[in-house]
Amino acid sequence: MRAHVILRYIGMVMLLNSAFIFISFLISLYHNDSGQLPLLFSFLITLLWGVFPLVFVPKATNLSNREGYLIVVLSWILSCFFGSLPLLLYGGEFTFFKAFFEAVSGYTTTGGSVLYNIEALPKGILFWRSSMHWIGGIGIVVFVLIILPSLGKAQMTLAKMEISPLAQENFRFRTRKMLNIILVVYIGLTLLEVILLNFFGMGIFDAVNHAFATVATGGFSTKNTSIAYYNSPAIETVIIVFMFLSGIHFGLLYSTFTFRKNNIFNSPIVKYYFWITIVGIALVAINLHGNIYESWSDSIRYAAFQVVSLSTTTGFANTDSSIWPSFSILIILFFTIQCACAGSTAGGMKLDRVVIFFQVLRSQILKIQHPQAVIPVRIGKHIVNEEVVNSVVLFIVLYILILLLSTLALSAMGYDLLTSFSATAACMGNAGPGFGLVGSMSNYGVLSELALLDLSIVMLLGRLEIFGLLLLFLVKSWR
């Protein structure tokens, strides 16, 4: 394994980060705020760290599996460390662990914050928080395709880690074409949302920041009370639509926009995603009506926003959902664990795996009834092979195990069960707010530094789909 080659490719990732830090510095310079020096120093440090490997390490095009895995995983981890520099140097509410948690939350598009007064931050720092979302929203796929264009066999392995095989079926293009699709859809959704948010009354700076967070399904807002600050049904509707679209496989969105056959209307996964969201909104709205809100319009408005926000792992809030009835909280927790579609910017378990799991369950029940029958697991017309089925079941078991272990760890630190479980579920699913002490109108600043470190690791496990981070500790055992 060639350490110098690994450093060279990680250096490219650092250069990408430094470019966005520099843009944040320019914004801070324009507004003449207190974020100028922290952003400038962070830019120079990140730039130098990225440039040196490119200058002194010769180019290498052939990478082994181990090198590919290490480049991707270390790129995520080091991005979080360097991303925390502007926050740490700025100071204010940020200690080292709080700055690191905020950066991990940004890059993994979790959106959970430790800040009590977000509006007190300089414009440049606010833009950097949103930029971390936008960089992390594209995810490992872009790291692989842009930073590691000649990965060889490792590319297939990493694609299997990041996107379920069912989702890969929707990317029936060459690697470069796939990259173009992701970029076109990602940038297109962002620009369109900026225009619409600005049209409905949101200032251009806030519109850009909220579009970055929406399309990346992140959730960082420039306001202390998130989207509730605007109290605008029109703005909320725009954000609901773009959160929902950002939770759909980008390949399917591209096929739909270009009038191809393999589109969202023919996808069984998207159909399930649509109807389960509608059912979730209906159940929560019915439960809220008469208990929290008197009118049906308010019940549907707040139910729709919170269900879509948590199901897509975005984490925006337009009301305090922590005071809702237990039934509504349980419904939202289900969506926080299930999350949206593979191939989107959403994190978490992924809806595709849930669908495959229930098809596996159905298949096993039928086999018990008909022992001699051959009953393949199907998603629509696609037969899911046994290897995929095993990996899905293993992933779900590990996901639940990590949820339980982290919940136990937080409970051992003295936090109540609702806070411990919902915080873990929200961070593992990269969804942002939980319930209890970390509700939608509260933040993670109430937690201890040890708890923040635990949840930072959980966020990385969720974003790297568990195996990516675990394999970092098993590199020596690879053959």
Image (tube, helix red, strand yellow):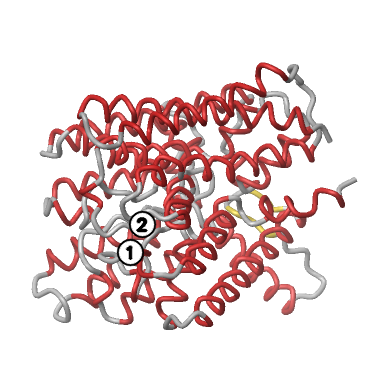
Left or right position of 154 against 356: right
The three-letter amino acid code for the residue at tag 1 is Asn
- Say which quarter of the image contains residue 312: bottom left
Q: Quadrant of the N terminus?
A: top right
Task: Name the residue: 40% across, 62% down.
Answer: 276
Say what secondary structure mark 1 lies in.
Answer: loop
* Mark drawn on residue 113: 2
Task: Name the residue: 26% across, 70% down.
Answer: 321
Task: Name the residue: 70% across, 56% down.
Answer: 470
Left or right position of 400 against 114: right
Q: Nearer the viewer, residue 353 or 449?
A: 449
Asked if the residue at tag 1 contacts the one at tag 2, i.e. Cβ–Cβ closer than 8 Å, the answer is: yes
Left or right position of 71 against 296: right
Say what secondary structure mark 2 lies in.
Answer: loop
Q: CA distance from mark 2 to mark 1?
A: 6 Å
**Residue identifier under label 1:** 443
Q: Position of residue 233 (x, y in %)?
A: 13, 52
Q: Position of residue 476 (x, y in %)?
A: 85, 49
Vertical position of residue 428 compared to residue 286: above or below: above
Task: Name the residue: 58% across, 39% down.
Answer: 140
- Say which quarter of the image contains residue 256: top left
Left or right position of 92 against 459: left
Q: Position of residue 10 (x, y in %)?
A: 64, 32
Vertical position of residue 479 compared to residue 473: above or below: above
Q: Nearer the viewer, residue 362 or 27?
A: 27
The three-letter amino acid code for the residue at tag 2 is Ser
Q: Position of residue 358 (x, y in %)?
A: 59, 67
